[in-house]
Image (cartoon, rainbow, N blue to C red):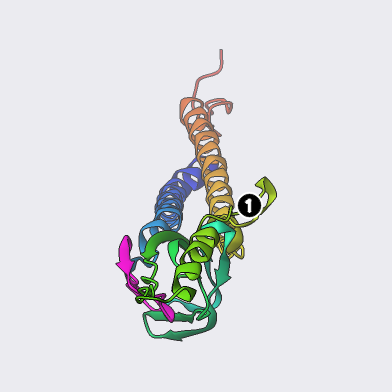
Amino acid sequence: MPAASVALARPGNRRLVRVITVFAGVLTFAALLLVAGPASAHDQLLSSDPKDGATLDEPPASITLTFSSAPLDTGIEIVLAGPDGTTARGEDIQVDDEVVTAQLADDLPAGTYDVAWHVVSSDGHPIDGEFSYVVEAAAEPVDEPTDGSTAAATEVPEMSTQEAAPVEEPTDGAAEATTPSELAGDGDGAGVSGLAVTGGILAAVLVVLGVVVMMRRKILENDKLRQANEADPEDPDGDKPNENQPKG
């Protein structure tokens, strides 16, 4: 009777192991999707105004960034590093669907500007990037001297003296402080939640695999018990003497 009960239990246990194994595979596949999916689902910068490498005749009044999807209206930073240690930040930042617009100060000097931007994409992960543009200096009008005018003749040397005045170079500390990527920051840690979810799913997969190992071990024990019962069956009539056997 015990052997029969073990034999009947084996199909059910194996069916349960199959279900648990399939469930563990599904969890593993979902964990891989969560790890690899966000990396390919981040928003991308489609265009900027000014464009990367553009040369402008006058300083822009604003900077516009266009993304593949609407970024979150939080944690947005746009930082400019210009000539002679000039730094500026985008102000009054507005998000209109996929377009982010930041206003700039109107007194920025001419020169080359490196722009570092940082936003939080629609999937909650921070993204950033850089581009640059050049603002050309406007030509300064020069008064042509008239005949018999001594005032104009004295103004020209003064102008040349001003142009030849030495320009103070920024110190190393100022250069470090004006790096666009450092001013923009490294993000607000929005990716921590994704790591926590992935860790939880991997822990669940390990638990399921542990259950599968225990169930397989239990099935092997049941198989050994069934084989032992089949090899040494109990015969309740084997020890009784034959009553019909003639007495000697």
- Whether residue 185 is visible here, answered yes or no, is no
SS category of the residue bearing label 1: loop
Q: Nearer the viewer, residue 243 or 212?
A: 212
Q: What's the residue type where badge 1 is placed?
A: Pro
Q: Which residue is mark 1?
A: 170
Q: Residue furthest right?
A: 173
The image shows residue 230, relative to residue 155, as above or below, that is above
Residue at 49% across, 75% down: 151
Give x and y (percent) for residue 118.
50, 66
Question: Start and end of the magenta stretch?
Answer: 48-70
Residue nearer the viewer, 95 or 13: 95
Residue 18 on image: x %, y %: 40, 50
Q: Based on the displayed image, in which of its 4 quarters is residue 129 positioned?
A: bottom left
Residue 66 x/y as whole percent: 34, 75
Is residue 123 depicted above or below 84 in this figure? Answer: below
Horizontal arrangement in the rendering, residue 86 relative to residue 153 (left or right)? right
Q: Residue at x 35, y 65 (%)?
A: 44
Asked if residue 20 can be seen in this view, the reply is yes
Give percent across and percent down for residue 50. Answer: 34, 71
Q: Residue at x 53, y 65 (%)?
A: 158
Q: Is residue 227 above or below residue 45?
A: above
**What residue lies at 52% left-to-right and 50% top-to-bottom?**
205
As for residue 63 lying within the magenta part, the answer is: yes
The extreme front residue here reads 148
Vertical comparison of 248 with 225: above or below = above
